[in-house]
Every structure is written in C-alpha cells, then in structure tokens.
Image (cartoon, grey):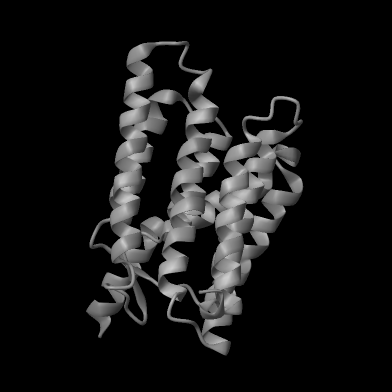
Amino acid sequence: MINLVSFADLLSIFNALFGFLAMLVLFIDSLEMRIHISISLILLGLLIDGLDGIIARKFGSSSLGEYLESMADMTTLSIAPAVFVFYIYFDVIDANIYHYIYLLLALALFLGFAIIRLASFHIMKKDKIFVGLPASASTIILLILAYFEVDFIFILPAVIIIGAFMASNIHFPKPDLKINAFAAFFILLTIAFNKNYYGFAPILLFTGILIYAIGGPISLKLSKKRQ
C-alpha cells in the first residue's frame, strides 16, 4: 500500500496531521497560546491542502490522491474547525444546557454539510468554478468568527449558513494564482501576528474571504450576462 502513496499524497497526510494536532493542543491546559496555536495549525493544514494540489498537477497524482485529499480535508477543514468553535464557546455559554444543545446541533449540521461537500467534490468538479463555497473559505470564515469570539447569538446561524453554502449548488469562481498568493500571504500574517496590532491580519483575511463568498457568485452572473 505504501507504494501507492505519491509525494502529493504525503502532503495530504501532513494536512490531516495538522488538523489532528490542532484539536489536541486545545486540551493541553499548561500550553500557553493554545488557541492561537490551534488556529495556526489549521491554517497551515489549509496551506498544505493548496500545495498538494499544485504538486499533484505538476508531478502527477496517485490513485489514492482524491480519497486521501478528501479524508485530510475532512479532518482539517471540517472536524478541527468544529472542535475549535466548541472549545471557544464552551465557557461562554454559562453551563446552559439549551445553549449546549443549540451549539452541538449547529456544529452537527455544519459537519453534515461538510461531509456532503467533500464526498461529492470530485464528482461535481469543474474547470473554472467551484460548486458550493470551497471548504477552505468556509473554514477561514468560521475560524476567525470564533477567534474573535463573536456573540453566541450570531455564531449559531453563521455555522449553519456557512455549512449550507458549502453544500449548495451556488457557483463560485476559481481564484487565479495571484489571488491565491495574496490569500496565502494573509494566512501567514495571521499565523505570525495573532490578534496583535488590532487584529489587522485576521480581519483583512476575513474581509477578503467574505468579499469572495458574497461577490463571487455575483461576478459570475454578471460575466454570463455580458457574454
């Protein structure tokens, strides 16, 4: 079986490992800055996810590639963010059993939508568009909302809406290399600067992804009308 694994596949495995570690560090009480370390590990996994696609296109992929990528993304871009959100709001909801239930239901819906999206991604894959909001964009939006601890009332609908957009039939344009490079740059800034300097790095990253999530489908419709 090991012989079936390509270099791009190894990157997918590392992607999953980063997601797994991101969950584990949250429960190490003696570890300072564990929240920042956790979100940084998820974002690094996201960068590796983009890198393994580039490597696979340049050097070829194995027969395991698509399956490994989906499994890795399930860990890093779905389960780990859900655990991150639960950890952030665990102490905020004041031991209210109904709040726990609402949060768990919202995260369960998010995971359900994520499973559907990742399982169908390669079936519905298109050259110039994404069907449904990319899991990477969904993860970034959800992580940063939780990172800044937005009010509990807002995080619940946000979790559900983000998940629904992932599994929707809405079309989003595939970003070109320059846009991906800018996104990677702001991800690295977020990892490096945390919420220092008024949180400029995660706020800029969040703003850019939100503009893409809202403006992407609109730009596609406008371009079709022009044609």
Asked whether residue 177 is in view, the answer is: no
Q: Locate the C terminus by quadrant.
A: bottom left
**Observer-nearest residue: 190 or 219?**
190
Residue 14: quadrant of the picture: bottom right
- Residue 45 position (above or below residue 152): below
Residue 44: quadrant of the picture: bottom right
Residue 222: quadrant of the picture: bottom left
Label total for image: 0
Q: Residue furthest bottom?
A: 59
**Residue 55 locus on image (x, y percent):** 58, 80
Asked whether residue 66 is in view, the answer is: yes
- Residue 59 position (above or below residue 31): below
Q: Which residue is rendered at x = 43% and y = 52% of the image? A: 138
**Residue 1 locus on image (x, y percent):** 50, 74
Q: Which residue is rendered at x = 37% and y = 65% of the image? A: 216
Q: Which residue is rendered at x = 44% and y = 49% of the image? A: 78
Q: Is residue 97 left or right of residue 51?
A: left
**Observer-nearest residue: 155 or 59?**
59
Q: Which residue is rendered at x = 61% and y = 78% of the image? A: 7
**Residue 204 locus on image (x, y percent):** 60, 51
**Residue 58 locus on image (x, y percent):** 57, 88
